Amino acid sequence: MDPVALIVQKYGGTSVADPDRMRAVAENVAFTRRHGNDVVVVPSAMGKTTDNLIKLANDVSKTQPGREMDMLITTGERISMSLLCMALADLGIEAVSFTGSQAGIITDSMHGKAKILEVKGDRVREALAAGKVCVVAGFQGISIEKEITSLGRGGSDTTAVALAASLAADSCEIYTDVTGVFSADPRIVPQARKLARVNFDEMLEMAGAGSRVLALRSVEFARNHNVPVHVRSAFTWEPGTWVTDQERSMEEPIISGVVTDTTESKVTIVAVPDRPGIAAALFEGLAAANVNVDMIVQNTSQDGTTDISFTMPKADMATAESIVGRVAAEIGARGVSHDSDIAKISLVGAGMKTSPGIAAKMFRTLADESVNIEMISTSTIRISVVTAASGLERAARALHTAFGLDSGQAYSAPLPERK
Ligand code: ADP
Ligand code: ASP
Ligand code: MG
């Protein structure tokens, strides 16, 4: 008989959105178990549960202490884990659920976006040794101060890959509502092409550029611990995309994907005095509040003043607003403006390193579509631009075509509505 493999399976919110979906997922877990594998399952909260809990908090309170917010939003995954164990019991599979805390997922104390420091996993190992399927609530852990923490939106991916790394699992399957990682979000670019394989570095750039198909931290874990990740559909169950450490082959296209992101806002501080220390004062304040600033542009100085624009997550706007307002007043800037109607569009591809002219072709393509570029940033294997949100689809599709990525047919698997 083959040696037993240990497989970690993560199911996203749409995949467990209702009782039928929960039972379908239980069937797949049972199928995997009956084929002789040890299985650890990480479910997300059902459907829009996390969004609804956040909305509920907004309806009740303006203050929302981080500790209480995490107590609230981590409940979604607890609902899923217990229901999944019940559905497994119906199928005659012995399963046991654990919260992040019970599974020994130890994090720092940054409520709302805690980082995993260590996965102890003792109870998970014991339960596996006793022949049980383990179901571990995604998106949460316990801090070194023994408080419940959440890992940031999309954090169940990180729970799954971190568990897979700690348990030395053979693979980590990320089940979602598309059939793999594509050359662009198939909801935005129907001609997107499914990638059979992606290497960790490219996936890291795609996730960093804002592709939500895998959470950035989960890719960091996968790369650092060399966990093979298989992104696939919980609706068609067909083989998906393997994210591994494999080298690229020569025949692969220069550009592997177009990434779109609408989760950021642009902030501009107008007429900032042009002298040393101003940028430091501004960005130190934001860093201290744990706001992740992404792109930064400073215009050339006119009459001793300059404008500074930067992008940051919309979700952190409330925190950032007071800091930026205070610093702007302190440094004598004329004012602050916000624009949340923006999109970031990135081209990612390891082949970019050795191919000149990619940026020029990108800008020409956008110009031909009359899409105005507001900001630009680059890395060795990525070019990102910020544009008005209204041009997002047009720009993404045009770039996808211009760089020869179109598959020749529209995405055909079911694309479940995100309830
Ligand atoms: P889950 O709830 O399963 O975690 P997510 O919404 O976090 O699902 O991620 C899956 C979604 O990611 C897909 O429905 C798709 O719209 C989007 N997506 C963005 N970029 C890509 C890409 N390059 N390939 C596949 N899906 C992508
Ligand atoms: N339920 C959490 C969210 O909606 C975590 C996840 O789904 O990965 O962000
Ligand atoms: Mg996700």
Image: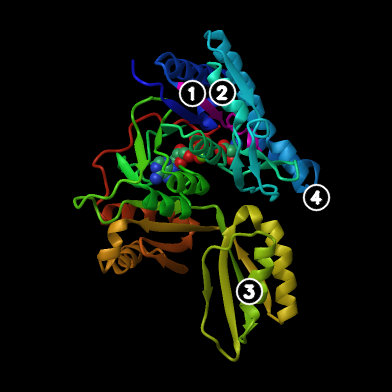
The residue that label 4 is drawn on is 63
The residue that label 3 is drawn on is 269
Q: Nearer the viewer, residue 368 or 94?
A: 94
Other residues around mark 4 within 10 Å, as few (<14) / some (14–19) / many (≥20): few
Q: Say which quarter of the image contains residue 180.
A: top left
Residue 176 visible? The answer is no
Disc 4 to disc 1, how far (Cα)? 40 Å
In contact (CB < 8 Å): disc 2 and disc 1: yes
The residue that label 1 is drawn on is 39
Picture coordinates of residue 190, whole percent (x, y):
35, 41
* Residue type highlighted by circle 1: Val
Q: Nearer the viewer, residue 151 or 238?
A: 151
Residue 75 visible? The answer is yes
Q: Nearer the viewer, residue 236 or 242?
A: 242
* Residue type highlighted by circle 3: Ile
The residue that label 2 is drawn on is 134
Region of the chain picked out in magenta, as a range: 38-51
* Residue type highlighted by circle 4: Thr
